[in-house]
Amino acid sequence: MKLKTFALTGVAPFLIGTAIIGGAMAADAAGKAKFGTWGYDATSMDRSVKPGDDFFSYVNGGWAKRTQIAPDRTAAGVDVVLTDEAEQQVKEIVEGLARNPKAGPNGKEGAGGQRVGNLYAAWMDEKGLEARGTVPLKPFLAKIAAVKDKAGVAALFAEQGYESPVDIGINPDLDDPTRYVVAMDQGGLGMPNRDYYLREGAKYDGFRKAYRDYVIKVQTLAGIPDAAAKADAIIALETKIATAHWAPERTRDIEQINNPMTVAKLSALAPQLPWPAMLAQAGLGAPAKVLVAEPSQVAAAGELFAATPLDVWKDYLAYHFVRTHATFLPHAFDQANFDFFSKTLRDVPQQRERWKRGVQLVNRSLGEEVGRIYVAKHFPPAAENQTAELIANLTAAYAERFKTAVWMDEATRKAALVKLGTFDPRLGHPKKYIDYSSLKIDRGDLLGDAVRAEQFQWDLQLARYPKPVDRELWDMVPQEVNAYYNPLANQITFPAAILQPPYFDPNADPAANYGGEGAVIGHEMGHGFDDEGRHFDETGKVRDWWTAESVKAFSVRTAALGSQFDAYEPVPGVHINGKLTMGENIGDLGGLEAAYAAWRRYVDKHGEPAKIDGLTGDQRFFIAFAQSWQTKVREGALRQQLLTNPHSPAEYRVNGIVRNVDAWYAAFNIQPGDKLYLPPEKRVHIW
């Protein structure tokens, strides 16, 4: 069983590359802006491009021409700059702890710092990994080999670290988000999603051939005999699992994935699997309620469980244990993992330096322990205070737009204002940090450390179940460059790492701050009212609080927006999926329009700003927004994003959005005949 955040949680991350964040309300700030004279580097522009033809390239074309993607990266962009900076800051912390784990670099990190230092040291001990070889792997493979029957297979499905066609987890209850509930989601695949198994064409045939080679190689490295025949059986099984998987856009439909049932009903749905025993094995006892996201997939998993021979399931479990833990094994395993999942699928030519991946490991496994130290060193309180002020302006802007939305009836409008008024913004870091004291980290046992960290995370969830939901918990760590909205708690969260230069700049022009940070905050707030968020009320409960009339009017607008995005083809043969990306596209459009409204509120109070570098305040607002998506992506990574991710590619998060915003047309004198021009009646306005 893999611990995971289910799609049904509704947590909507912003996704890096994310928008650049400027400072807040800094009209008279002392000091120089991070970028150019007002928060933007004019050399990044390509003035040979008409803004109405390709606004993304007009703003970012100069940068794109001179910028190469680093060989160990899937993308380049402003987000990569800040992520690299955060990684360097965490590196200084963890290297100091690894050298002096008892005291830490500041002499005060104690046992928590020792755990961080030991894990990083275990990761960096490549000689030790090679010397131990596959010895650390053998007890886990022996455990699988010892399984005598299907009941033993099902027991491993329910344990941490082992693959399962159905993932079991703990989630806030969609019908009562103050309580946790057992939740189930589709799983069981080795490749990113069902499309890699089922899509036709030479490109996907190539992926499947490379995957077979990979399955053979990692089994061979692990000393598993008859690897080729086993690979064929494993891939055939995974293909059947993939066939039953719901398409990613369907998993976003709250009404379809909210399927609470008793264990008895679950057992009737998929009687081939021993659910009471599996739930008990997972430490969940006998729950009164189970939330099943994709019932037809669970039913199919039961049929496959019965129809597939015991030995195939055991081979499947052994392969997936090696696959999911390959980075904690000798170099050959790690390299094979990189060669397929990064080089073949995402076109990344070079493995990242080991220290960078070590930073990622400690962030994943001991994230809040590292975050506690990171915040003390790198997060100024002023950033939190200034961002809070901008959030207040965005809230007022959304309230104005709700009040004037002609398609909303009064009952829905009133309820929307209530939900808006109960938003819970969280900035910087948690008020309390996770206690990792029960997690054992051994410098000489990296694989064991990884498995124990997986178990720790599961035990942490078990300790919370079935207690009331703790609203102070975070789903991101402070050193993460991202942001998210959680509809089950009606919270928006901005970790510390995204609230600093180059994203957070208190010396930037206010227009840049509103076009950058304002649009990001507006995006996250907008998730409360997108095609998913509208199903959750102000308490986070799934409840139909919109009238039928408002739903119909909303759906007309979202269908038009979806059609626009369906037409975009970033990779030959692969279009944007307008249904899959709907929530994020709504967030981008609503967030930009709300940020612009907040910007005009600022102007009404302080006066129309003077031109800077020949640009009006409104032009600077939209340029800052487009600069925030300054990104180049490798084709393979872009393909994977299009097939699996609910976020549209960066270029279309600019061009696909601004063409619907009337103020953009006025700011840049966009005219019929310009490639992005849409006649007024074709522009989508939601908020």
Image (cartoon, rainbow, N blue to C red):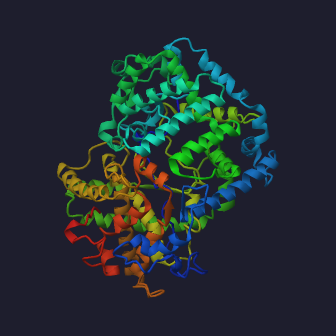
- Is residue 609 positioned above or below 251 on the image? below
Residue 127, picture quadrant: top right
In the picture as drawn, the residue positioned furthest to the left comes out as 549
Q: Residue 94 or 437: which is nearer the viewer?
A: 94
What is the x, y in percent for residue 1? 52, 29
Query: Does residue 524 appear in this view?
Result: yes
Check the image and report above or below for 343 versus 33.
above
* Residue 200 or residue 436, whichever sits in front: 200
Q: Which residue of the protein is positioned furthest toward the front in this rendering?
A: 202
Q: Which of the image's four quarters has the C terminus?
A: bottom left
Residue 545, image x and y in percent? 26, 47
Classify residue 301 as left or right of residue 118: left
- Classify 196 as above or below 56: above
Answer whether residue 192 is visible to the viewer in this image: no
Give the residue drawn at x 54%, y 30%. Answer: 462
Going 38% across and 37% down the picture, which residue do you hit?
Answer: 198
Q: Left or right: where does residue 9 sit relative to residue 449?
A: left
Query: From the viewer's perspective, is 317 left or right of 286?
Result: right
Q: How many numbered marks does the figure carry?
A: 0
Q: Identify the residue at horizontal 24%, vertical 64% (top origin).
A: 405
| Percent x, y of residue 524 | 42, 57
